[in-house]
Image: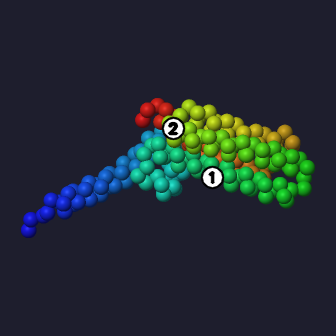
Amino acid sequence: MKMKPISGLFFVLLLTLWGHQILAAQTNPTLIIQACSLALQKDQCKRILESDPESKGADIHGLAKIALKQASTSATNLSKQIKQLLNKESDRKVKQSLNDCSDNYEDIIDKLKDSMAAIDTTSYNDVNTWVTAAMSNAESCEQGFKDQNVQKSPIIQMNANFHQLCSVSLAITNVLAGGI
């Protein structure tokens, strides 16, 4: 039986697209390892990226966006958590620290929005500047609890997770800035 030219073309196109998907699925773990090459905690970086379904088939730029998106989501969730804690808190020192953290996290969210726009234009130095500033704001938040002599920050673990996500984002954008 002779195949019609259009059906033959369709078959070749289908085979090419299917082969590309297999290749993308196979090379992605290598790409994630490459993306995490500059991360301080490489295994954590891998886990963060692999946990996002969008990482399958993503290129290195896509992985950077995923990491940044996760940091942004974390910051938004932290900001909401801080506001909830503020409504319940009665201790003056804790409340003052939470107010400061609330202001810091509003600024962090803005910096991460700017970073998302910068990553789309491959302005990796801007991304690094703003993510680093966001991390500094989060550290200032924690320092506020220490300065107020609060025994333990009620958001210390969430802050640590946010810091880790930012660190992963920085590692990947540094890889991108290096031209991988």
* Residue highlighted by disc 2: 121
Q: Position of residue 141 (x, y in %)?
A: 76, 42
Where residue 100 sits, quadrant-wise, is: top right
Residue at 90 percent across and 52 percent down: it is 91
Above/below status of 78 relative to 149: below
Residue at 57 percent across and 49 percent down: it is 69
Above/below status of 103 relative to 16: above
Q: Position of residue 108 (x, y in %)?
A: 69, 43
Task: Give, as a three-letter code, the residue at label 2.
Answer: Thr
Q: Looking at the rendering, in which quadrant would you find the C terminus?
A: top left
Residue at 59 percent across and 40 percent down: it is 115
Q: Which mark is residue 21?
A: none
Q: Looking at the rendering, in which quadrant would you find the N terminus?
A: bottom left
Q: In this view, does 23 lie to the left or right of 107?
A: left
Q: Can residue 169 be seen here?
A: yes
Q: Which mark is residue 73?
A: 1
Task: Give, as a three-letter code, the residue at label 1.
Answer: Thr
Residue at 66 percent across and 40 percent down: it is 111
